[in-house]
């Protein structure tokens, strides 16, 4: 009987300690905000951008806040997919017809020229932010 009372007393103390911990946890604010990674130019990753490839062909890319994009090539071909801004120097896209994400190295030089390098062929494209006010849009690929 003494063992039963001792076990009950220990269980009661444990429950009290747990309640205090729960109250303390409930009083502490929980941070759920995710830090937004900026684009290479220091602006938001979302928006409308023109991309000029090494051949001089210009496409337009609209990056939405929900992680999707739409790209319109110089010939009018429209494509879409998903994107991630992993860091200001790493921008990744996955076209809807592709199985893997492709990540581009991005930088802005001393003259303010923003470039993106294709990891597969080394082609360097120039990026220009067109719209910084568009809600739900982001960078290039």
Image (spheres, rainbow, N blue to C red):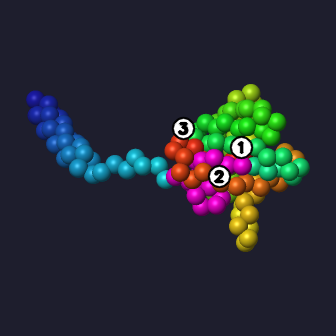
Q: Residue 29, position in %: x, y?
A: 30, 51
The dot on residue 66 is 3
* Of the image marks 1 and 3, the number of the one nearer the N terminus: 1
The relative height of residue 70 versus residue 91 in the rendered view (above or below) is above
Relative to 115, say whether 13 is above or below: above
Disc 1 secondary structure class: strand
- Estimate the spatial distance between the alpha carbons at disc 1 and disc 3, rounded to whole Å: 18 Å
Quarter-of-image position of residue 113: bottom right
Determine contact: label 2, label 3, CB under 8 Å: no
Q: Residue at x 15, y 38 (%)?
A: 12
Q: Nearer the viewer, residue 115 or 89?
A: 115
Give the crowd class for mark 2: few <14, some 14-19, many >=20 residues within 10 Å.
Answer: some
Q: Which residues are magenta?
A: 36-50
Q: Position of residue 33 (x, y in %)?
A: 42, 49
Frontmost residue, 90 versus 42: 42
- Tell me which residue sits at (64%, 38%) in the image: 69
User: Which of the two labelled residues, at mark 2 and mark 3, occupies the earlier sequence position?
Assistant: 3
Image location of residue 17, percent across then percent down? 20, 45
Location of the N terminus (image quadrant): top left
Say above or below: 109 vs 127.
below
Report the Cα–Cα distance between label 1 and label 2: 9 Å
Residue 95 painted magenta: no
Label 1: few (<14), some (14–19) or many (≥20) C-alpha neighbours in 10 Å: many
Viewer-proximal residue among 39 and 8: 39
Q: Which residue is mark 1?
A: 60
């Amino acid at each position: 009987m003494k063992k039963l009372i001792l076990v009950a007393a220990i269980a009661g103390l444990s429950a009290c300690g747990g309640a205090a911990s729960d109250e303390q946890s409930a009083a502490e604010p929980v941070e759920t905000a995710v830090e937004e990674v900026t684009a290479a130019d220091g602006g938001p990753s979302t928006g409308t951008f023109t991309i000029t490839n090494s051949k001089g062909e210009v496409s337009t890319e609209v990056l939405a806040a929900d992680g999707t994009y739409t790209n319109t090539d110089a010939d009018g071909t429209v494509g879409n997919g998903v994107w991630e801004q992993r860091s200001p120097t790493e921008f990744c896209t996955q076209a809807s017809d592709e199985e893997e994400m492709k990540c581009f190295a991005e930088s802005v030089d001393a003259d303010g020229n923003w470039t993106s390098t294709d990891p597969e062929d080394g082609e360097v494209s120039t990026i220009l932010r067109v719209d910084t006010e568009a809600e739900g849009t982001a960078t290039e690929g």
